[in-house]
Image: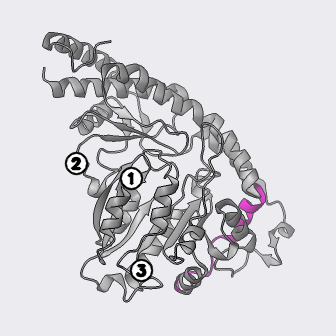
């Protein structure tokens, strides 16, 4: 098949007329297809809804002699802390178990840094003239918005196939105003990249000028394979401790895409000194998170091995959806020379790089045809993609049949935008 870039002008004009006609036919159907967020689909939610009945009587509410229904245990039930320690590879004393959202724990960490300072902060960040935060991109828009909401200056760091550009990171942290970096080390959002051991070693061994520099280590997809075997990961807390940075990392995870996103449990993992310090601050705003739900998850998920078995069941639902996306891109766009994309084996997204300057136009055409996707630029600080290229595709929510329709429309939108950019 001839690429659009080698076609003569007349052929491109004819192709544009055909594409517009096909897209108009899809638009006339009045479809409403949503690929905007990485939400588990109904089949996944139904698969784990038996967690709602795992607690049957009051006697089950006692765990390690603690009544989960009552006040107390700010850092979480001991059983829940043991569970997360097993999953992450750290010790129970290095965990703080939260509610349904790890994003809340991330926000609280940054908020406490501004209002009180972190463990090694000379003063609260709110008193500083400037705070800068490193943002590997494309990355997770909600990470960026947390630090942006407090007034931090966001600094883009390009992602490579091995993780963040570490030469640039090591240079930037020499500035004492640089207070941290956002990281999704396994199946990064949205590229699906697994940080290389070398990149992780260099991150753990950073020598930042700021004594309270923090690795915001969002291990959201630590057990989230949808293709192939489980990929082990190292305990970042141990790596930082061995590198002489025991208090530099705050690790986060949750069961949002393991059990029920709106009713899961989350965790903050950090050094024992950090956990004690954060408990002192968190104890002012709460007595404890929902320990009944923590217990429900402990009884249901049990341990890492049981969790991985459950994730294998999730993968049998997710795998065909991701293959549908990649098959459409391979079939409709690759032969025409339109863009590039990663081929992730886990996580929740496919990251598509459209021809430069066309992402916003593609997503405008998608909206008009009834397909909702993450806004262009969302994967970059301040919502500005300098190349107007990256588009995050979230295949998890729609059934395969709807996903195939959405991808057919998406590919037509890419083709139309590319032809328009080449000139009619």
Q: Residue furthest right?
A: 59
Q: Residues within 10 Å of mark 1 (few under 14, many from 20)?
A: many
Residue 54 makes an appearance in the image: yes
Residue at the spot of label 1: 139
Q: Going by the image, does 385 lie left or right of 263?
A: left
Looking at the picture, tell me which residue is in the foreground, 372 or 64.
64
Asked if residue 246 is positioned above or below residue 1 in the image, the reply reads: below
SS for tag 2?
loop
> On residue 278, which mark appears?
none
Q: Is residue 283 magenta?
A: yes
Q: Main secondary structure of the magenta part?
A: helix
Q: Going by the image, does 310 lie left or right of 28?
A: right
Q: Residues within 10 Å of mark 2 (few under 14, many from 20)?
A: few
Q: What is the distance, in whole Å, between disc 3 and disc 2 at their CAs?
A: 31 Å
SS for tag 1?
loop
Residue at the spot of label 3: 212
- Sequence order check: which comes first, mark 3 or mark 2? 3
Q: Going by the image, does 311 lie left or right of 380?
A: right
- Sequence order check: which comes first, mark 2 or mark 1? 1
Q: Which residues are magenta?
A: 281-300
Quadrant of the snapshot with the N terminus: top left
Asked if residue 385 is positioned above or below residue 299 in the image, the reply reads: above
Q: Quadrant of residue 129?
A: bottom left
Residue 249, position in %: x, y?
A: 50, 71
* Residue sitting at x 52%, y 33%: 322
Q: Is residue 217 magenta?
A: no
- Sequence order check: which comes first, mark 3 or mark 1? 1
Residue at the spot of label 2: 386
Q: What is the distance, in whole Å, between disc 3 and disc 1 at their CAs?
A: 23 Å
């Amino acid at each position: 098949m001839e690429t659009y870039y080698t076609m003569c002008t007349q052929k491109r004009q004819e192709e544009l007329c055909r594409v517009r006609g096909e897209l108009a036919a899809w638009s006339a159907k009045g479809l409403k297809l949503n690929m905007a967020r990485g939400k588990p689909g109904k089949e996944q939610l139904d698969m784990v809804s038996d967690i709602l009945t795992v607690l049957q009587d009051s006697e089950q509410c006692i765990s390690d002699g603690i009544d989960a229904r009552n006040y107390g245990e700010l850092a979480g039930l001991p059983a829940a802390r043991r569970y997360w320690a097993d999953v992450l590879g750290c010790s129970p004393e290095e965990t703080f178990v939260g509610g349904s959202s790890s994003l809340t724990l991330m926000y609280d960490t940054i908020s406490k840094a501004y209002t009180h300072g972190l463990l090694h902060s000379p003063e609260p960040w709110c008193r500083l003239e400037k705070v800068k935060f490193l943002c590997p991109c494309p990355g997770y828009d909600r990470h960026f918005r947390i630090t942006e909401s407090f007034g931090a200056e966001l600094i883009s760091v390009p992602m490579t196939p091995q993780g963040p550009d570490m030469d640039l990171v090591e240079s930037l942290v020499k500035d004492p105003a640089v207070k941290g970096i956002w990281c999704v080390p396994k199946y990064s959002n949205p590229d699906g990249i697994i940080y290389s051991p070398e990149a992780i070693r260099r991150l753990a061994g950073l020598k930042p000028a700021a004594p309270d520099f923090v690795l915001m280590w969002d291990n959201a997809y630590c057990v989230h394979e949808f293709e192939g075997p489980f990929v082990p990961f190292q305990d970042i807390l141990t790596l930082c401790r061995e590198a002489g940075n025991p208090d530099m990392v705050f690790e986060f995870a949750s069961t949002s895409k393991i059990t029920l996103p709106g009713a899961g449990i989350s965790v903050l993992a950090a050094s024992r000194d950090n956990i004690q310090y954060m408990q002192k601050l968190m104890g002012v705003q709460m007595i404890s998170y929902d320990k009944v739900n923590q217990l429900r998850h402990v009884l249901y998920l049990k341990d890492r091995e049981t969790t991985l078995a459950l994730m294998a069941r999730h993968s049998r639902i997710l795998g065909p959806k991701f293959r549908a996306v990649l098959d459409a891109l391979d079939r409709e766009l690759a032969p025409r020379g339109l863009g590039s994309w990663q081929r992730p084996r886990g996580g929740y997204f496919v990251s598509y790089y459209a021809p430069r300057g066309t992402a916003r136009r593609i997503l405008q055409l998608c909206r008009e045809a009834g397909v909702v996707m993450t806004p262009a630029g969302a994967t970059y600080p301040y919502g500005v993609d300098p190349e107007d290229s990256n588009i995050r595709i979230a295949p998890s929510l729609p059934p395969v049949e709807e996903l195939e329709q959405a991808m057919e429309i998406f590919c037509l939108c890419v083709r139309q935008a590319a032809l328009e950019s080449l000139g009619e």
